[in-house]
Image: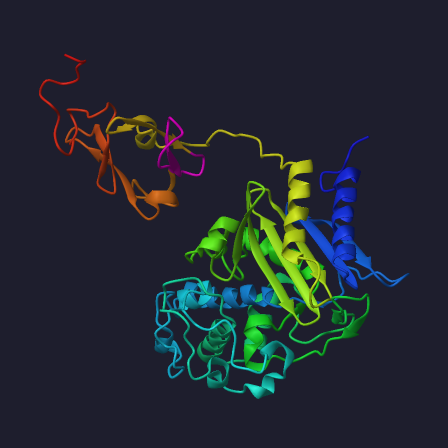
Amino acid sequence: MTTPQDDLLPATRRALLHRIAVAQTEGRAPSLVAAVVRGGETVWNGARTSVDGHGPDENVQYRIGSITKTFTAVLVLRLRDEGVLGLGDALEKHLPGTGAGEVTIAELLAHTGGLAAESPAPWWERTPGSLRPELSDVLGEKPFRHPVGRRHHYSNPGYTLLGALVEELRGAPWEQLLRREVLEPLGLQRTSGRPQAPHAGGWAVHPWADVMMPEPVQDLGRMAPAGQLWSTTADLARFAVFLIRGDDRVLSAESVREMRTPAAPPEAAELAAGAAYGLGMQILHRDGRTLVGHSGSLPGFLAGLAIGVEDDVAAVVLSNCTSGPPALTVAADLVRIVAEAEPRIPEPWRPMTEVDGSVMELVGQWYWGTQAFGLRLAADGDVALEPLSGIGRRARFRANGDGTWTGLDGYYAGELLRAVRRPDGSVSHLDLGSFVFTRQPYDEGAPVPGGVDPEGWRGIQ
């Protein structure tokens, strides 16, 4: 018997169902829905509910809370890619008069602006947004809790400022812009600022008794860009594919990769827990793999979106209770179950269709001082420089089209790699941010900072 390429094995499906069943039971959730994406397609949907004969499906809306922030970040990155703003710009340049204008756009996206975690009382998630009609009502008289740029401190008001920034520069309401620029191009027809039938009701479950009561649904007003949205597992599955691959109608693959890259210094506890934050996206290290996505919560609802980019697997978990199942943890577990039970089958190796001889001349072994490195050429024209011992600095480099490469990661991120040639055209050495790499350790024929001992290499006298 053969298994279709896009189907999961029965044992994998049962493991996924078991995980969400345990989450719904132990978390005492009225309902819980989940979906798994692999290879750009939804390959599994699951649901558990406390109501006999009725199970929510992938098209039932739940409130997704702070996953909304990732959508808001996409709108901001679009402005950056269009050249309307720079991530290093101070907020004051584009949105004057807020009282928090010294914070940069990047700091707001990464929660490093030093702003308060919440708006002034009363609790904004459980009161009408009409109580905070102006940005000054959201920020309060003393908006800062920490020096700007010094630490990661999650801030809901910071994303209110980003929403206001988008509105200022586009000249339209945040939700209207989101629908036009993100939701419609990606086909997210069941994602909205207000609930649309069919949708789940939000519940508060008593901590000491198996009883519950409905939570009120509040319009968050100015705070909408931080947590307003309702969505479905089907829509969030499509959004996950976008966050892996990009979509040139919305954001390029390079820009969504930037969103997934750590941009905030983690606190000690976050570092110990393997957590970081990018530009509108959480980054987690779990079970030996890196996951990106976001969690979300509002009274009556919990949400989690976890993406294993290297595994090309993503999972969505939504529930309708104020506290209970750890949605992001459950989503991460669903990714792990699929990735471990059915590892991604790599694409077949294929040779390059054409090769630049001047680049082939550079591949192979090089030395930085006495440390041996290998330079390898990839099919896409990028190169990788790695210590042969497996210990030390390594990096990938993107070709610039002029015979140089720019570092993509690690110590050499942003640094320039170039081959230095002699007058006769032969390669003398590689220059990497002033570091000299030679074909032999401390090669006399290439520049060596500090020189070479005239007696050369020798043993113990």
- Place residue 29 in its image quadrant: bottom right
Whether 438 is drawn above or below 312: the answer is above
Rendered residue at 43%/34% (across/down): 378
Rendered residue at 66%/47% (across/down): 333
Q: Is residue 187 magenta?
A: no
Whether 442 is drawn above or below 40: the answer is above
Q: Nearer the viewer, residue 274 or 185?
A: 274
* Residue 170 image point, x, y percent: 47, 77
Q: Number of callouts in the render?
A: 0
Q: Is residue 6 left or right of residue 155?
A: right
Q: Nearer the viewer, residue 191 or 22?
A: 22
Q: Is residue 379 magenta?
A: yes
Please report the bounds of the magenta region as a residue range.
Answer: 378-394
Whether 455 is drawn above or below 141: the answer is above
* Residue 380 image point, x, y percent: 44, 39
For this orientation, the residue located farthest to the front is 208
Coloring scheme used: rainbow
Q: Is residue 232 left or right of residue 453?
A: right
Rendered residue at 80%/66% (across/down): 209
Asked whether the viewer can see residue 283, the reply is yes
Q: Name the quadrant of the C terminus.
A: top left
Asked whether the viewer can see residue 257, the reply is no
* Residue 353 image point, x, y percent: 46, 32
Q: Name the quadrant of the N terminus.
A: top right
- Place residue 146 in its image quadrant: bottom left
